[in-house]
Image: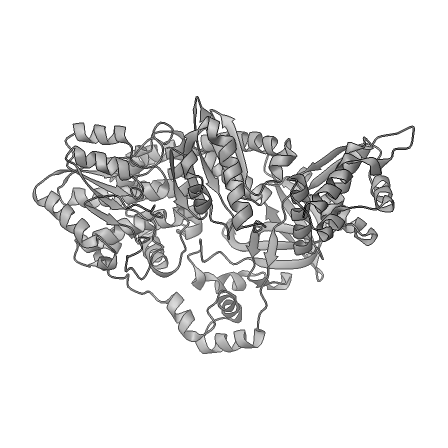
Amino acid sequence: MNIKLWDLPPLDKEAAVNLAKDCGIPPLLAALFMVRGFSDQEGVSRLLSRERLSDPYQMKDMDRAVARIRRALEDFEKIAIYGDYDADGVTATAILYTYLRGKNADVSFYIPQRDGEGYGMNLSAVDTLAREGVELIITVDNGISANQEIAYAKSLGIDVVVTDHHQPHEEIPEAAAVVDAHQMDDQSPFRELSGAGVALKLLIALEDGNAEAILAQYADLAAVGTVGDSVPLLGENRQIVLAGLEQINQRRRPGLDAILDLNGDGATSTKLAFSAVPCINATGRMGAPERAVRLLTYEDSQNALALAEELRGDNRRRKAVEAQLTAQACQIVEENPGLAAERILVVAGENWHHGVVGIVASRLTERYGKPCFVLSCEGDSARGSGRSVEGFSLFQAVSACKDLLERYGGHPMAAGVTLPVENIPEFARGLNRFAQLNCPEMPALTLRLDCSLKPAAINLETLAALEPLEPFGAGNAQPLFAICGVELKGVRPVGSAGIHSRLLCRRDGRSFQCVLFGVGPGDFPYPLGARIDLAVNLQLNTYRGENSVEILVRDVKLSGLDQRACLKSLRIYEKFLRQEPLSPQEAQELSPTREQLAVLYKTLPLKPGPALGAELLLSSLAPQGFTLGRLLFSLDLLRQAELIQGGVRGNFISAGRIPVESKVDIFASPMLAQLKDLQKAV
């Protein structure tokens, strides 16, 4: 099961009204500023203003990088840009390649194949570039951990300038220059740039600080990379994306125009995230990633359109493979309760497509509410990606297991590894040992809502009031509102496949509809008439020239549900499944009475039928003293005693009674003996 916590901060309405008057903004916008930490006029002005980017020479080694690149330009050395296959690396490559080509440099680019080479520099690629006569390699969006490869390049007479934004390891590569704001002695006032953002700052330094000229030419590409890499859209990143959106809407780059297919509606950060970025990423996942660089550097609209359609085809194939592997990975987890109970899930499969394992890891993290690693095994080697939850550094956990790994890298929320297949079990144990010691109770996935909203306030005026907060993205999320105490009146399928739902709702005498993506009517765990709470985004919908507000559901929960109590109880149940010592209070949280077991048994149908929502079942049994942990433990207890069949699937319970002819002494169950033993072990 997965329980998301809803974080709905308190709001000082009087202070919000005063802030609105001081800043001349709508009260709703003032309220949003306050809950996001901008509680005075100075803070609001700072967020909304168009500040200049900081001096690029404040970045460590920027002077050395500029000097080495200028020397290469003057001597007409052969330069290779070594990029990456994701949207950030592709756009960073396109930025630097286009700039150097405009300087008449002898320049090429190299994008490693995800499936054959993996992330970052590799020795074979260095050999290839050496044979081509390359004298200078400039890395973008990689290189900070390529110590061996950079040393090898140096032995072949090739200098390397590193530009990266990932966390450095303990040893910094011995390169001609290393530009990465995460180095300990870096003096940058802003350290959260994407790889494309770092490339942009390099160009500004090469142009003696002329940020306006560089932004006018390359902010569009940097905006795609910045949105694609999910760095916080605050500070300099916000300025880059704002400038980039202006450039995109002028439609001056044929390749980007073709892949966005704007249709005159204009670009937003959300459109970048859901159109350009997935197609660029899919090209690296499913095929030859250098095509995306070619598309972004095309000057011919007709060729750009044809290549953009190729990228969209890659994205369609990516979705199909992702869905297949996600289903396989979920099956592995759900058929193994011990694995599902771990603090960090590690799932491996044979010859899984390397291009989608990172996305599958994200899907598993979203589904199970825990950090997840998904590994693909080919022969004796395994390679894969992990995703984390806020508050737990996956990079630190992976670093603690470095002796088991051949390669690793990443940051707190995501990491990639390569390791021998035989090391996978110990890698999984090592990650979980690290988590147990450093984060005994794994943080839950948390939805940070901005404020509550009444149905009467959902209108075009409200939507217009939100516009100054754009661009939305990491660190500056699209406003998320709670609509609480809604009566569910209907659930209808959306689309021919029926994998999405349209919810018909009513509150305060007003009826409204909203869309829930990724959950079909058959998987929606609430019956008609249920009182539910909705977490929603609002967006503009234009149909036949008419504008309206579309309500998109991010999450649903039963009204009145104490999520924190449920989560605490679930974590205790998982401790039992992991056979970890339990305190007397924790053991009591799980242990049912004979009367409670009888009530649960009688509540279940005679045979497994339509799945019951776990929240609804818990709500009906709460007056009898059931907690979530006790409910799940009791279901296991009844199933072990062969009194019921079926069980828990995600947030559903599909169980039915088994007829018995004689009395069963359920309190002789080995599970209860285990519970007592774990309590004694404290």
One can see residue 347 in this view:
yes
Quarter of the figure with residue 409? top left
- Above or below residue 451? Residue 583 is above
Colour setting: one colour
Q: Nearer the viewer, residue 135 or 596?
A: 596
Q: Nearer the viewer, residue 97 or 170?
A: 170
**Residue at position x 16%, y 32% in the image:** 156
- In this image, 350 relative to 184: left or right? right
Answer yes or no: is residue 251 visible.
no
Residue at the outermost left position? 75
Q: Nearer the viewer, residue 627 or 406?
A: 406
Residue 423, horizontal then vertical, whole percent: 47, 30
**Quadrant location of the N terminus in the rendered image:** top right
Q: Indicate the position of residue 348 as horizontal and vertical percent values.
A: 51, 30
Residue 363 place in picture, x, y as percent: 53, 40
Residue farthest toward the top in the current orientation of the protein: 379
- Examine the image and state in which quarter residue 53 appears: bottom left
What residue is drawn where x is 52% and y is 54%? Answer: 539
User: For residue 669, which quarter of the picture?
Assistant: top right
Q: Position of residue 353 (x, y in %)?
A: 45, 28
Residue at 34% in and 50% down: 194
Count of labels in the image = 0
Q: Image check: 199 left or right of 347?
A: left
**Near-viewer residue (666 or 469):** 666
